[in-house]
Image (cartoon, grey):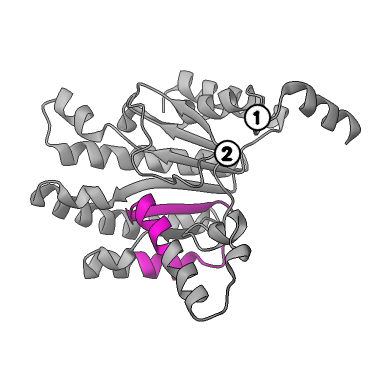
Amino acid sequence: MDTTRKQREEQLKQEILSVGNIPQHVAIIMDGNGRWAKQRGLPRVEGHKEGINSVREVVRVAGEIGIKYLTLYTFSTENWHRPKGEVTALMHLLLDTIRAEVDELDKNNVKLMTIGRLDDLPFLPRQGMLQAIRRLRKNTGLTLNLALSYSSRREITDAVRAIVAKAYKGRLRPEEVDEELISAHLYTAEIPDPDLLIRTSGELRVSNFLLWQLAYTEIYVTQIFWPEFRSVEFLEAVRCFQKRERRFGRVSEQLKAEQASG
């Protein structure tokens, strides 16, 4: 990182920490790896490789400013339909990255978890991920949550099936089904809903990602491709979040009255 960007990072970190309204959970749709590579006449996999450097910087700075959960849309169920060579390369890259980064993650007190159907992954990447999760399970800093073979519609379908199964066995009455119960059966049951969703590359869609959990999430879209999205760009997104008023369906006057009485 050059001196100018390092100075900008430090400036943004100080601004964010002084404001104090830091998102507890940030989710990111890491888009644009292929287009970044294409612009440079490189194979698509080179974009994915460069994107690892972005992940490394964002994980570091997220932990430094006190974010508790960082969810990265790493591999969707739809991604299995990409060319076989690209999918194979991505699985190798996933395994290599986990092996290369686990020491640094442990050093930085990062906990690792996944959402999605990990069993869909080939044996070696799956085992590598499970080993890393076990090694980092006692860490108490940032929780890095990787969405792997993930589909939000499938997640909701799985939740409905589990709830229906309980009802079928007589363990649940229809009137007991509410939002809290549904949330408790999602892959993300152990973590809060995202406060901030970041999408790189300028696309204006959520791509089957956390459809239930994003109900009141603030959304930040940047034209920057993921391989160029580093610590400064992440901090700028967080600073933008801090300037927004989250009303959750209410009006500003109600929020001000609640703050005054609280």
Q: Quadrant of residue 171?
A: bottom right
Q: Residue at x 33, y 55 (%)?
A: 148
Residue 140 appears anywhere in the view:
no
Q: Residue at x 70, y 29 (%)?
A: 250
Residue 75 appears anywhere in the view:
yes
Q: Which residues, given as a range, are shown in magenta?
A: 129-158
- Asked if residue 123 is among those painted magenta in the image, a careful observer would answer no
Circle 1: is it few (<14), some (14-19), or many (20+) Cα within 10 Å? some
Query: In x, y percent, where is residue 185?
Result: 51, 63
Q: Nearer the viewer, residue 165 or 135?
A: 165
* Residue 59 horizontal side relative to residue 228, left or right: right
**In which quadrant will I find the N terminus?**
top left
Q: Nearer the viewer, residue 209 or 251?
A: 251
Is there CB contact under 8 Å for labels 1 and 2? yes
Q: Residue at x 57, y 37 (%)?
A: 216
Circle 2: is it few (<14), some (14-19), or many (20+) Cα within 10 Å? many
Q: Nearer the viewer, residue 182 or 91?
A: 182
Query: In x, y percent, where is residue 16?
Result: 64, 28
Label 2 sits on residue: 195
- Foreground label between 1 and 2: 1
Query: In x, y percent, where is residue 26?
Result: 52, 41
